[in-house]
Image: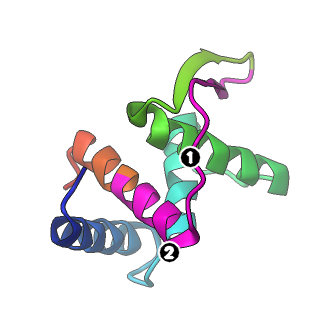
């Protein structure tokens, strides 16, 4: 687990880098960053996605982000190239603030692994 101050600094670094790269510096929120991670994990590049595909992209990202925590496990790519995950362990009941901290920590870890930060 990342220390609170280190998480804040690393999170701000991720937000700045991703916002500069994908939103002309306009500050992206957690949901937007999760969506972009889903696009990255799908690996099809820039394209227009339908509403249900956008939700699926966010689901892919959440599964990928929480995989190192033992909550999900990658299973396979379907015929359209979409990754599928299975639940290994149910997520604990978390308050909204706790969910946000968990996801920010997972995003920071993801971009650390990708050597962005």
Circle 2 residue = 29
Nearer the observer, disc 2 or disc 1? 1
- Asked if residue 43 shows in the view, the reply is no
Residue 8, given in percent of the width and then of the height, sits at 25, 73
The answer to which image quadrant residue 31 occupies is bottom right
Magenta extent: 80-105
Which residue reaches farthest front? Answer: 93
Cα–Cα gap, marks 2 and 1? 23 Å
Q: How many marks?
A: 2
The answer to which image quadrant residue 60 occupies is top right
Of residues 115 and 25, which is closer to you in this image? Answer: 115
- The disc, 2 or 1, on the residue closer to the chain's N-terminal end is 2
Disc sitting over residue 92 in the figure: 1
Residue 85, given in percent of the width and then of the height, sits at 62, 25
Whether 23 is drawn above or below 76: the answer is below
Label 1, secondary structure: give it: loop
Is residue 48 left or right of 38 when viewed as pictured?
right
Label 1 Cα crowd, 10 Å radius (few <14 / some 14-19 / many 20+): few
- Residue drawn at x 83%, y 50% is 52
Whether 54 is drawn above or below 41: the answer is below
Of residues 23 and 94, which is closer to you in this image? Answer: 94
- Asked if residue 72 shows in the view, the reply is yes
- Residue drawn at x 27%, y 41% is 114
Of residues 16 and 90, which is closer to you in this image? Answer: 90
Residue 101, given in percent of the width and then of the height, sits at 41, 64
Label 2, secondary structure: give it: loop
- Residue drawn at x 39%, y 73% is 19
Residue 66, given in percent of the width and then of the height, sits at 47, 40
Label 2 Cα crowd, 10 Å radius (few <14 / some 14-19 / many 20+): few
Whether 37 is drawn above or below 43: the answer is below
Indicate whether residue 91 is drawn in magenta.
yes
Q: Please, which colouring scheme is shown?
A: rainbow
């Amino acid at each position: 687990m990342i220390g609170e101050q280190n998480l804040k600094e690393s999170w701000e670094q991720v937000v700045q880098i991703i916002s500069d790269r994908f939103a002309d510096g306009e500050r992206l929120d957690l949901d937007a960053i999760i969506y972009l991670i889903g696009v990255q994990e799908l690996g099809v590049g820039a394209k227009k996605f339908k509403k249900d595909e956008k939700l699926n992209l966010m689901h892919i990202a959440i599964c990928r982000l929480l995989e190192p925590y033992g909550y999900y496990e990658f299973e396979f790519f379907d015929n359209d190239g979409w990754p599928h995950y299975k639940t290994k362990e149910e997520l604990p009941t978390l308050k909204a603030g706790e969910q946000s901290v968990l996801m920010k920590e997972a995003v920071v870890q993801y971009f650390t692994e990708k050597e962005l930060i």
